[in-house]
Image (cartoon, rainbow, N blue to C red):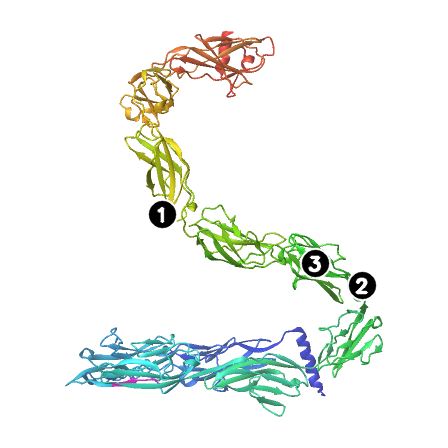
Amino acid sequence: MKLSWKQLILLSFIGCLGGELHLQGPVFIREPSDSVVPTGPQDKKVTLNCEARGNPSPHYRWQLNGSDINLSLEYRYKLSGGNLVVMNPTRNWDTGSYQCFATNSLGTVVSREAKLQFAYPDGPTSRARSAVSVREGQGVVLLCGPPPRSAELSYAWIFNEYPSFVEEDRRRFVSQETGHLYIAKVEPSDVGNYTCVVTSALTAARELGSPTPLVLRPDGVMGEYEPKIEVQFPESLPAAKGSTVTLECFALGNPIPQINWRRSDGLPFPSKIKLRKFNAVLEIPDFQQEDTGSYECVAENSRGKNVARGRLTYYAKPHWVQLLEDVEIAVGDNLFWECRANGKPKASYRWLKDGEALVLEERIQIENGALTIANLSVADSGTFQCIAENKHGLASSSARLKVVASAPDFSKTPMKKLVRVQAGSELGLECKPHASPRARASWRKGHTMLLDDGRISFLKDGGLKIANVTKADAGTYTCVAENPFGKANDTTHVVVTDPTRITVAPSNMDVSVGESVVLPCQAQHDPLLDITFTWYFNGVLTDFQKDGSHFEKVGGSSSGDVMIRNIQLKHSGRYICMVHTGVDSVSSAADLIVRGSPGPPENVKVDEITDTTAQLSWKEGTDNHSPVTSYSIQARTPFSVGWQTVTTVPEVTDGKAHSATVVDLNPWVEYEFRVIANNKIGGGEPSVPSEKVRTEEAVPEAPPSEVSGGGGSRSELVITWDPVPEELQNGEGFGYVVAFRPLGVTNWIQTVVTSPDTPRYVFRNDSIVPFSLYEVKVGVYNNKGEGPFSPVTTVFSAEEEPTVAPSHVSAQSLSSSEIQLSWNAIPWKLTNGHLLGYEVRIWTSGEEDSASRVTVAASRTSATLRGLRSNLAYHGAVRAYNSAGAGPFSATVTATTRKTPPSQPPGNVVWNATDTKVLLNWEQVRAMENESEVTGYKVFYRTSSQRNMQVLNTNKTSAELLLPVREDYIIEVKAATDGGDGTSSEQIRIPRVTNTDARGSTSAISNVLPVSGYIPIVLVFTVNALW
C-alpha cells in the first residue's frame, strides 16, 4: 500500500510521541445520571457529573437535547472539571436530555443521556372539595388528586387535625400508587375531614391538599355485598432484574373482605416474598426471571369473592459480556472488533467514532454488534464506542484504535547475542522486530546469504530453523528485516556444544527404615558450559535446606550425589536426577523402596464374648513393603497398668490370619483390645482400640487373701482380710461368707458380708472367752453362686482390759518445765493377753478436760513430761492399757514445776591463758523474784574442731581450765539453778597460744572474738582492771 507524504509525516510524529509517552484515549470514570430539581427557593444549582481519564487530559463539552451548550454564558452554566453546573435552572429552559463529550488528541467519547426534570410545582389540588356522603356499611374511595409524578412520592392522610393520621388496617388502605384512601366498610367513627398529604422522597417537602368531608347519609345502613376490588395491579407489569416489585390489592365490601395472594400456576411463593399492610401489599425483593408469571389477588367475604390478575414480565438493561479493549494494528491490516451484551429484550448495537455515528461504507461493516474495517489506514485511528441498548436502558464501552506504520526496529525486541546449541539437536533463531506492516526477513551467516535447503528453513514469523546441528553451524547469524518504510538488521552468535550425558546414574534400591544411602548422579558435559544438578522426589523439587535433616548433597560441585540419612517410610518413591547446562538437560530416575514395620491394623472388632474369652477380627493395615509375619494382641481394663499382652488361641497368630480368640480373661470386666502387626523389621504401631466390651458373669474363683484378726474390745472376735479386687469379683452382687469356730469345735458359725469393699467383720457375744483361739475362713459369692473359701487360719478373740491401777505413784519436779511420774508395774498374766503399756495423764487445777497425755511401753515405770509452764502445780495419774482398752487410773499425785532460770546471762567474761590452762572470770548472776536461785555455774567448752561441748560445774564466778591451748577454744558460761540452766553468755573464742603467756591486754583482747564477729568494748576495760 502506498502512503502520501502527509501520512508518513503524521506517522513519524505519532511514533515519536508513542516512544516518549503512554498515550490513552478518553475513558469515562463517571457519567451523568438523571436528576430532579426540587421546588423551593430560586437560588439553587444542579450539578451533572462527568469525568474521564486519558493522556493527554481530556477536555469537555455538553449537549442539551442534541444541541451544544454555550458554556460562555457564565451566569447560566459553569464547567467544573468535566462536571456541568446549571445555575438557577428553570423548567422551560433546562428540562431535557444532557450528554457529556470528553475529547483529547486521540479521540472523543460520548456519555449516556441523563434527564433533568423538575419536581411538581404544586401540591395536591388546593381548591375546596365537596363532602362525600355515604351510608354506614358502604365502601368509599377518597381521591388525593396528586400532581403528575416527576419524582418519588409517598402518601398519607390526616383525619380531622394534624398530627392525627389515618391508621391502615383491614378496613382502611392508602395506595402508594394512586395516593387515594380506601375504606372497605364505613363506620360512624369514620365521619370527619380527610386531608391528603404528599411527601417528596427527594426533598422531604410535604404538601397538603384541601380537606374532604365524609358524612353519613340518613337513609339507613347498607346491607352486605360481595367484595369489589378497587386497587389492583396492571394486567402486564414489566419488572427489572434485581429490583423490588410491589403489587397492591384492596377491595370494598361488607363484611370486610379478606385479601389473599397466589400464583396462577399453583407454585408456592418463595420465602423472600413478603406480605404487608394486612395482605394488601405483595413485595418481591431481588426480582429474578423465575419470579415472572401470573399473580392473583383474591378478595373474599361471606357474600362472595372477586379475583384480580396480572402478569409480571422480566426485563434487564443491557450489561456487558465482552467489553472493547484498546488495539494497535498495522496499516493495511483488517480490524475485527466485537462487543457483546446481555439484556431482555435483546440489545441492539450502534457504533460511534470520536463521538459521531460511524458512517458505514464498503470496507466498514457492522453485523450483530461486531465491527469490521478492512485495509486499515492511519485515518481510521480514533476512539470508538459500542452502544448496546434496549427500551429499558443502554450500556456503553469504549476503546482506542491505533493504526500504526513504522520501519523495522529491533530496539524493543533484540535478538539474543549468544545462543548455545547442542550438536545433533535443532536450532531455532527468532527475528521479531517491531514493524508496521510486518517486515519481510532474510538471513545470512557471516557474509553468506542462507537458502532454504530442507535442513535450513525459514519460518512464517521470520525465524530461522536449522535441523541436525553440527559444529560447522557455529558462527554469526544476521536477520535483515524490511518493509515499505525501511529496513533493519540484528545479529546473534551461535556456539555448538557437545551433548551432556550421565555417566553414573542412580539405581533402584531396597532399604529398611533408619538406614542411610547414597543415590549417585555424575555426568560428562561440554567444558564451555556450567553444570547444575537438581533432584525431584515424586515429581516435587527437593529443597536441601528445608529437608536438610534427611537430604544432603555429597561429592562436591562436580557431582550430583545425594545422601539420604535415617530413611523413613515417607521417603519411598521415585527419585529423578536432572543435569542442566545452558544448552541441554538430561535426567535419570531410580525407585527407592523403604521397608518398615507394619502400619496399624484396621477395624478391630469383638465378634463374640464369653466370661473368659473374646473372638476378635481385624483388617490388614499397610505392610510398608515387608509382609506381616504375625500379630500380637493386647488388652486394657480399668484395673490394668496400661496395655498388657494377652494369651490367644492359637498362641501365635499367623500374619495371614485376621482373627484370633483371646483366652484367660476375667469374668465381668470391661476390656478394650488392640492388635499389633509384626514383620521382619519389627513390631508396628498398634491399631485403634476396639470398642469397650464386658465379659459375661461367672462364679467367683478368688477368695480373699491375708485373712487374720485379733484385737477388739471385750467379748469381740475381730476377723480381717484384704478385699477381693473388682476385676476378680466375676459379677454383680459380690460379697463375703465369714465362717469361724472355737478351736476344737466341729460346727462353723457363718455370716454374710454384702459389701465387696469391707475388709473386716466383728462378732460380739458375751460368751466369748477373752484371748481364746478361733479358727476362721472367708469365702466369696456373687449372683452366679458361691466361690471358694480361704485357707483356715487361727486368730485370738479380744483380750480383757486391765482391771487394776498402777500403785506407788509419785511425782517429782525436775525443772521449770519438766515433771517426772514414777509407779510400780501392775500384775499381769500372759493368759490375759499382751499388756501394751501405760498412759500418763497430767493437768493443772481447773484444766482436767484439756489434760496432756503420753504413753510409754509396758516395760517402763516412769515418764517425764516436758514443755510445762513454770512455777505451777500439776496433777498426774497413770493407767495400764492393752488392745481391749485401758484400765482404771491410779491415785492422783501433785508436783509443782520450779521457777524459770535467770534470764540474765553471766556478764563480763574475761580470760587469761597459758600453754596449759585457761583462767576465766565473770560477774555474778542475780535471780529475780520470779526466777530460780542460782546454785552454781556451768562452763561449756570445746575446741573449734569439736562438735560436742564439755561441761565444768562450779559454785564460784571463776574457773580454771587445765587445757593445752594448741588450737582455738569456744567457751560459754551459764548459771545453774533448780529450774534449769540460765541464759548463756556470749560465746567467746580463745585463740591458740603461740608464746608462753597470753595476758589480758588490749592486744590480747583484740583476739577475743565472739562467734558473732564483734568484741564488746567492756571486755577491754575489765581485763585492764583485773591485770
The image shows residue 196 at horizontal and vertical percentages of 28, 80
Nearer mark to the viewer, of 1 and 2: 1
Amino acid carrying label 1: it is: Gly
Residue density around tag 1, few if under 14, some if 14–19, many if 20 or more, within 10 Å: some
Where's residue 800, x and y in %? 32, 26
Placement of 39 over or under 782, stated as above or below: below
Q: Which residue is mark 3?
A: 509
- Image quadrant for the N terminus? bottom right
Q: Position of residue 550 (x, y in %)?
A: 65, 54
Q: Which one is earlier in the sequence, the residue at label 3 or at label 2?
A: 3
Cα gap from disc 3 to disc 1, whole angstroms: 64 Å
Name which quarter of the figure residue 552 lies in: bottom right
**Which residue sits at x=38%, y=39%?**
778
Instruction: From the image, tell me which residue sits under label 2.
Output: 528
Residue 860 is labelled as none
- Gap between marks 3 and 2 measured at Cα: 34 Å
Q: Does residue 906 appear in the picture of this structure? A: no
Which residue is disc 1 drawn over? Answer: 733
- Front tag of 3 and 1: 1
Which region of the structure is painted magenta?
A: 227-233
Q: Between residue 481 and residue 742, name the one nearer to us.
A: 742
Residue 228 on the magenta span? yes
Mark 3: amino acid: Met
Say which amino acid is labelled 2: Leu
x and y percentages locating residue 112 in the rendered image: 50, 82
Q: Compared with residue 992, is residue 707 higher up or lower down, i.e. above or below?
A: below
Which class describes the residues within 10 Å of circle 2: few (<14), some (14-19), or many (20+)?
A: few
Q: Is residue 128 above or below residue 668?
A: below
Q: Earlier in the sequence, mark 3 or mark 1?
A: 3
- Going 34% across and 34% down the picture, which residue do you hit? 746
Q: Give the Cα separation between the discs numbered 1 and 2.
A: 93 Å
